[in-house]
């Protein structure tokens, strides 16, 4: 990939809070022009990775580059190209929507006021309403519109739909997908719920135990993996490198393998794997040994 | 950025400006009647002078405005209120509500965001306190002329030190806010620190900003200022800041209270008054003081002290915001 194809690269990116590592030795590459899902259980380091990418945190070790630039430099140039929507979509609660728009204009060289006002009109959110008086879904919409009004090249969303009801989730995703279609913005968003991402994302990053457990194009990943169901085996089969997980019932053994297809052993049946199942299998695995442990 | 700062802090700014305005109005009202007691200027009544009308004016000053000192001691908290109420929410409120993530992901780098806020709110704190100390200085004019400007209700409220106190409270509240991440605990911590530092500096450091001057004179017979507890010796200027007075023997050795007490007993036994008794023994009375002209030197030294503390606290704030290592 060339530099313009890559929205975000991290190399050995680590963040430690006092004694605990929030993110450890994270190395990944995120392609531009895609909608990337960042999945992991609570405490996996999703928020930390997003905050590091937005320049809100300084890494303890390693580097992160966003659109070819170092976000920790915190320059107006790099800030202008990143849209960030924090968890629980914080807004100045005492500001009216109109004042939030004014805030966006006063703190950005480029701010598409028209975009926000149009979006608010479409959603029926009055401009003179205080942000604190809006519903959770409306607040999320306002926060998203403010982030989109910067026309960022990369949009970072931290669990944007965690607090939303199903209808609000749907509306939120519609707006987001509309922006992707119009602007071609790269979206990296975190979640711990897989189903809602399946329809909108085409790239996947799975974080587990503060490390990257799996990353890649979703279609490719689904094609590379398959479920093999066969008679129960007590010992783990050989060539375990390709086996992601094995589950045993009374009579059957189910293996999730990453072998890119190929012939199946006699007595075994191959099935395609769903995204949720795939993600869960990787999340259940114990995190890979640390770099230091391998080096030692 | 300017608009954002105003919009976010206009509530505190308005309330504090009103507070200063009300305090100033009260002082102007009370001060007008106090100044009216001395239609020919207060200077002619100073230093125990017996100019015409002074006895009445001073009597009325005592009766009608005797509360001034107590009232002004309350004003000592105003620099804290002004500084801390602007400083505490500066970062704590953003951290409390998560809006730091909104504010710092616009196109304004957060060090610039911080610089604008610190400069704007710090300047406001300085302007409000300077306005207040200007009014207090005007109000206290007759008292300053009569009692000097080194008393606690004068030195701490006049000149430039109140502005330095306010900046110290501002910086401490901002630093506590970024460390504690909540406005109210930050305010409480700032109040504790403000009182502790103010009391410690005024009590333990201020007398030593310069080495005191000492005057020593032989006790003269019949001197009515002579007292067992210590002489009420004059330095020649009633505006000087007198730190201590006492007696010493002819060799210059300072006498303890017990020694003077025994001398007093001796004097009584021999039927003499204490002054005569002391004179016969060649006892000197001494006074240790700072001359009144040192007022501005002391003001600048104390202001510099609080400004250095302010600078150190602001460095903590800058460091925390730069790293955001919470």
Image: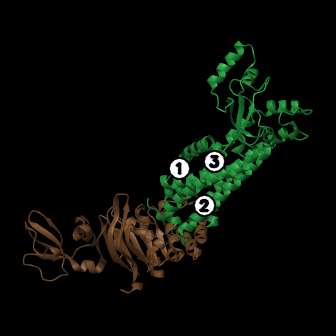
Q: Earlier in the sequence, mark 3 or mark 2?
A: 3
Helix, strand or loop at mark 1: helix
The answer to whether residue A133 is seen in the rendering is no
Residue corresponding to mark 3 = B81
Q: Is residue B135 above or below residue A239?
A: above
Residue corresponding to mark 1 = B186
Question: Residue most toward the front?
Answer: B251
The answer to whether residue A50 is seen in the rendering is yes
The image shows residue A295 at horizontal and vertical percentages of 23, 71
Q: Chain of mark 1?
A: B
Q: Earlier in the sequence, mark 2 or mark 1?
A: 2
Q: Chain of mark 3?
A: B
Helix, strand or loop at mark 2: helix
- In this view, the residue in front, A219 or B240, is B240
- What is the image's colouring? by chain
The image shows residue B156 at horizontal and vertical percentages of 68, 44
- In this view, the residue in front, A272 or B91, is B91
Residue B57 is left or right of residue A187, and the answer is right
Residue corresponding to mark 2 = B118
Residue B164 is left or right of residue B140, and the answer is left
Q: Are marks 2 and 1 on the same chain?
A: yes
């Amino acid at each position: 990939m060339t530099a313009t194809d890559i929205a975000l690269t991290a190399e050995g990116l680590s963040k430690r809070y006092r004694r605990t590592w929030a993110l450890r030795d994270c190395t990944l590459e995120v392609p531009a022009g895609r909608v990337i899902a960042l999945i992991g259980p609570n405490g996996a380091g999703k928020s930390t990775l997003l905050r590091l990418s937005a320049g809100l945190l300084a890494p303890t070790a390693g580097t992160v580059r966003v659109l070819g630039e170092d976000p920790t430099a915190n320059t107006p140039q790099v800030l202008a190209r990143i849209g960030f929507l924090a968890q629980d979509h914080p807004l100045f609660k005492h500001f009216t929507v109109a004042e939030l728009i004014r805030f966006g204009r006063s703190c950005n060289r480029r701010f598409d006021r028209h975009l926000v006002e149009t979006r608010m009109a479409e959603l029926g959110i009055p401009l003179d309403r205080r942000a604190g008086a809006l519903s959770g879904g409306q607040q999320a919409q306002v926060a998203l519109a403010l982030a989109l009004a910067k026309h960022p090249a990369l949009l970072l969303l931290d669990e944007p739909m965690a607090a939303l009801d199903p209808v609000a989730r749907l509306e939120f995703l519609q707006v987001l997908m509309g922006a992707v279609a119009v602007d071609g913005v790269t979206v990296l968003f975190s979640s711990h719920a897989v189903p809602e991402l399946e329809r909108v994302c085409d790239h996947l990053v799975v974080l587990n135990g503060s490390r990257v457990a799996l990353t890649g194009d979703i279609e490719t990943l689904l094609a590379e993996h398959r479920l093999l169901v066969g008679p129960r085996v007590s010992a783990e089969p050989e060539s375990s490198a390709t086996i992601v997980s094995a589950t045993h019932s009374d009579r059957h053994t189910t293996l999730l393998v990453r072998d890119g297809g190929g012939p199946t052993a006699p007595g075994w049946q191959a099935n395609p794997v769903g995204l949720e199942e795939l993600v869960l299998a990787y999340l259940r695995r114990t995190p890979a040994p640390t770099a230091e442990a391998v080096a030692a | 950025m300017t608009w954002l700062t105003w919009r976010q802090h206009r509530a505190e700014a308005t309330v504090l400006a009103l507070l200063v305005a009300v305090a100033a109005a009260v002082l102007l009202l009370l001060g007008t009647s106090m100044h009216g007691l001395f239609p020919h200027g207060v200077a002619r009544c100073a230093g125990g002078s017996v100019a015409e009308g002074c006895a009445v004016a001073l009597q009325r000053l005592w009766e009608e405005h005797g509360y001034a000192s107590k009232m002004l001691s309350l004003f000592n908290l105003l620099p804290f209120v002004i500084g801390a109420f602007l400083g505490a929410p500066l970062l704590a409120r953003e951290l409390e509500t998560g809006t730091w993530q909104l504010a710092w992901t616009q196109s304004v780098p957060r060090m610039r965001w911080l610089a604008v806020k610190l400069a704007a709110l710090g300047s406001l704190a300085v302007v409000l306190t300077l306005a207040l100390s200007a009014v207090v200085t005007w109000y206290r004019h007759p008292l300053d002329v009569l009692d000097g400007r080194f008393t606690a209700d004068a030195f701490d409220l006049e000149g430039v030190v109140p502005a330095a106190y306010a900046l110290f409270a501002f910086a401490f509240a901002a630093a506590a806010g970024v460390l504690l991440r909540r406005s109210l605990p930050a305010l409480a911590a700032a109040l504790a620190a403000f009182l502790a530092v103010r009391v410690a500096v005024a009590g333990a450091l201020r007398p030593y900003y310069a080495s005191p001057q000492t005057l020593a004179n032989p006790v003269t017979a019949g001197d009515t200022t002579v007292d067992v507890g210590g002489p009420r010796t004059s330095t020649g200027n009633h505006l000087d800041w007198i730190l201590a007075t006492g007696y010493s023997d002819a060799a210059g050795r300072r006498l303890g209270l017990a020694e003077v007490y025994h001398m007093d007993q001796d004097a009584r036994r021999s039927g003499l008054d204490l002054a005569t008794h002391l004179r016969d023994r060649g006892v000197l009375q001494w006074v240790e003081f700072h001359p009144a002209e040192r007022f501005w030197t002391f003001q600048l030294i104390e202001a510099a002290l609080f400004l250095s503390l302010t600078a150190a606290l602001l460095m903590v704030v800058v460091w925390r915001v730069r790293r955001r290592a919470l």
